[in-house]
Amino acid sequence: MSTHGLSDRTRLKMSDVLAGRRRGGLLLFFGPAVIASVAYMDPGNYATNIEAGAGYGYGLLWVVVVANMIAMLFQALSARVGIVSGMNLAELSREHFPRPAVIAMWIVSEIAAMATDLAEFLGGALGLSLLFGWPLIWGMGVTAIVTYAILMFERGGFRPMELVIGALVMIIGASYLIEMFIAPVDWAGVLMGIGTPDLPDARALTIAVGIIGATVMPHAIFLHSGLTQHRAVTKDPSEKKRIVRFSNIEVIIALALAGMVNMAMVIMAASAFHQGHSDVAEIETAYHTLTPLLGGAAAAAFLVSLIASGVSSSVVGTMAGQMIMQGFIRRQIPVWLRRAITMLPAFVVVAMGVNTTEALVMSQVVLSIALPVPMVALILFARRRDVMGEFVVQGPVLWLAGLGAGLVLALNFVLLWQMAGFAVPGLSS
């Protein structure tokens, strides 16, 4: 990762804002949370959100809201740790944990990065395949070329990459805004779904676990701390405090947008599929069913958003993989090699003829197992005064972080329990 990716002019403007010589300036500090927010709109979310809307209408929208609130908290903590310590989460782990633990964390995090990229890469390739009628392997080839080309923008520094990713996020948001105008939405039902927590059966619980488990992403937690660690040079704690405040505002805005996109996915699926097509659970089926129900424009907007999601999240996944390797073992490999390593599992899955939706589900299981690593590490460092100084996290925020981590980990345990074939007490099958 580049640590000098801002122009001298931009850095001077940032210094003026931090020193109080320039008013406003919030947009100068925007970027890290926008990039991290891509993880919350990746193709893995498409599968769970479509299944939630088709099977339960608006009834699981409250799960999306809860997942988004947990995500906001952990991304804000990650950014805070990077800003205050000047180190990313992987570097802090290497510095403070025993060597065997560091090696284990690195291996688990690398596996998680590959599992993440499997879902993201397959999603983009699937969108291209459906939109243009190509074989899936062709879609994968084009996705590989496009993501590598976007990664080359990083040579120009932070800003060009942030602008490209931001543009792709806007495409995803605009696509779902179009869907909202086309789909016949019951807004009273939407409000009821947001405000009435309910899990009617075991399948609903499984989907809820999928939504939450796919929202708090291991690589996004690692990446956000790295994107903020060298972004602005501070002279005193008051300037650092101002950056933390700007970062918190950006996290709220960027992840609120990501949350609205996820809610729009559920709303679209509920409006289009719940009455008469409640068995829709795959991205391909959703696309083919959308065309006769809502017309070609709705189906095309759905695929455009899926392609933008797959490409942008695949780029971000590769950036996170580089940061994880560099932080844990002080090694950095060329971007093309990193891209090839993370693409390999996806090509193997397609060559073996594995169902893409099943591959997405399996990738989420791997992420469930890896998730405790960054969540617990982040909480441990955020509460350490020798790392955070006067910015140490304590009181209600620390308790909320612990509660959020406990909830996510418990639900992921339930997912693994169900996938092993065991029933969950108190829920109908």
Image: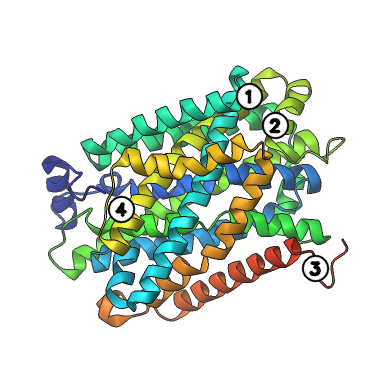
Q: Nearer the viewer, residue 355 or 316?
A: 355
Residue identifier under label 4: 227
The residue shown at (69%, 57%) is 208
In x, y percent, where is residue 83?
27, 62
Residue identifier under label 1: 130
Is residue 114 positioned above or below 120 on the image?
below
Residue identifier under label 2: 284
Tell me the element at label 3.
loop
Look at the numbered discs 1 and 3 and tell me whether their residues touch, using CB distance below 8 Å: no
Tell me the element at label 1.
helix
Which amino acid, mark 2? Glu
Distance in Å between CA atoms under marks 2 and 3: 29 Å
The residue shown at (60%, 20%) is 134
Which amino acid, mark 1? Leu
Which amino acid, mark 4? Leu
Q: Is residue 66 left or right of residue 400?
A: right
Q: Earlier in the sequence, mark 4 or mark 2?
A: 4
In x, y percent, where is residue 275?
85, 37
